[in-house]
């Protein structure tokens, strides 16, 4: 059995089967973590079982959290820091934490970092990041829409919280909606129709611009957000960039990892 005593920083993401999007987002975050913590070996795990299954069918093996931690135990690693890339501390984050708790006592040290939006400082920082993302669209004719994933978990309240931060910063043309919870696209649609907007610019409020961004946001289907806003007569532009491509988002994740390392 091969053994290593080098500590491991396990970067845990929801995951994606889009190779290029994975490289530009998840890979970029992992590279930033490795650069920031050269004494750690950065490894990858996904929480989305369907994505792991799909990738394995394509010959690409990515560990689940339990598989990754079990592998580290067998390799003799004694220190592990888990840093998630999840936007909210919702269902996937909770499952990740439950998986990690099962390994307490099997390492000398096992710590878990925060999700991207956890405490008040996170929301303040993300408000600044989003306003910066939208600065080139700060005109009275344009509504800037962010598509979040959404969850039945109580963490879903974070989207409204972030929206309030953005509005308080004076940006009334920025709207946050979700695919699978509230606010829905139809709620956002009603708000935008109250304005005098002529254009809608959309981008995902997700780490990766994966299936939701490509299909639910920018797809040609009747249920896509793009189609819905076009039906209302808006000129629609889709920016297919995940949050992982944003350097300031990566810095925030690195800061969370630093806190987990030093706690």
Image (tube, rainbow, N blue to C red):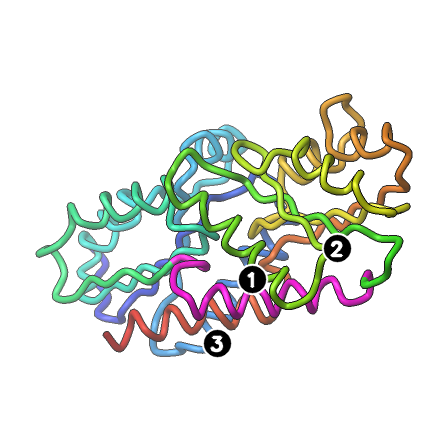
| The quadrant where residue 77 appears | bottom left
How many residues crowd mark 2 within 10 Å: few (<14), some (14–19), many (20+)?
many
Q: Name the residue beneath numbered marker 3.
A: 35
Q: Secondary structure at mark 3?
A: helix
Q: Name the residue beneath numbered marker 2.
A: 173
Instruction: Name the residue: 63% across, 60% down.
Output: 167
Instruction: Name the residue: 27% across, 69% down.
Output: 7
Residue 181 versus residue 84 in the image, above or below: above
How far across and down, in percent of the image, does residue 128 sit?
Answer: 61, 70
Q: Name the residue beneath numbered marker 1.
A: 165
Identify the magenta region.
115-137
How far across and down, in percent of the image, does residue 31 sit?
Answer: 52, 67
| The quadrant where residue 188 appears | top right
**206 left or right of 232 in image:** left
Of 24 and 253, the residue lying toward us: 253
Q: Are marks 3 and 1 in contact (CB under 8 Å)?
A: no
Closer to the chain start, of discs 3 and 1, is: 3
Closer to the chain start, of discs 2 and 3, is: 3
**121 left or right of 138 in image:** left
């Amino acid at each position: 059995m091969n053994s290593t005593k080098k500590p491991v920083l396990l970067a845990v993401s929801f995951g994606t089967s889009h190779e290029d999007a994975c490289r530009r987002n998840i890979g970029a975050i992992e590279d930033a973590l490795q650069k920031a913590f050269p004494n750690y070996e950065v490894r990858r795990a996904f929480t989305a079982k369907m994505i792991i299954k799909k990738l394995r069918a394509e010959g690409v093996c990515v560990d689940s959290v339990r598989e990754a931690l079990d592998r580290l135990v067998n390799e003799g690693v004694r220190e592990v820091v888990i840093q998630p890339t999840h936007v909210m501390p919702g269902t996937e984050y909770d499952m990740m934490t439950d998986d990690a708790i099962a390994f307490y006592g099997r390492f000398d040290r096992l710590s878990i970092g925060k999700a991207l939006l956890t405490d008040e400082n996170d929301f303040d920082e993300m408000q600044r990041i989003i306003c910066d993302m939208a600065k080139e669209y700060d005109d009275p004719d344009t509504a800037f829409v962010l598509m979040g994933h959404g969850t039945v978990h109580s963490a879903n309240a974070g989207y409204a919280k972030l929206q309030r931060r953005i509005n308080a910063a004076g940006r009334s043309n920025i709207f946050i909606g979700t695919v699978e919870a509230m606010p829905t696209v139809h709620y956002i649609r009603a708000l935008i129709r109250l304005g005098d907007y002529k254009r809608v610019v959309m981008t995902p409020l997700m780490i990766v611009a994966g299936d939701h961004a490509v299909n639910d946001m920018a797809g040609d289907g009747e249920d896509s957000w793009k189609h819905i806003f076009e039906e209302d007569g808006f000129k629609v532009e889709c920016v297919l960039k995940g949050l992982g491509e944003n350097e300031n988002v990566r810095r925030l994740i690195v800061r969370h990892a630093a806190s987990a390392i030093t706690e």
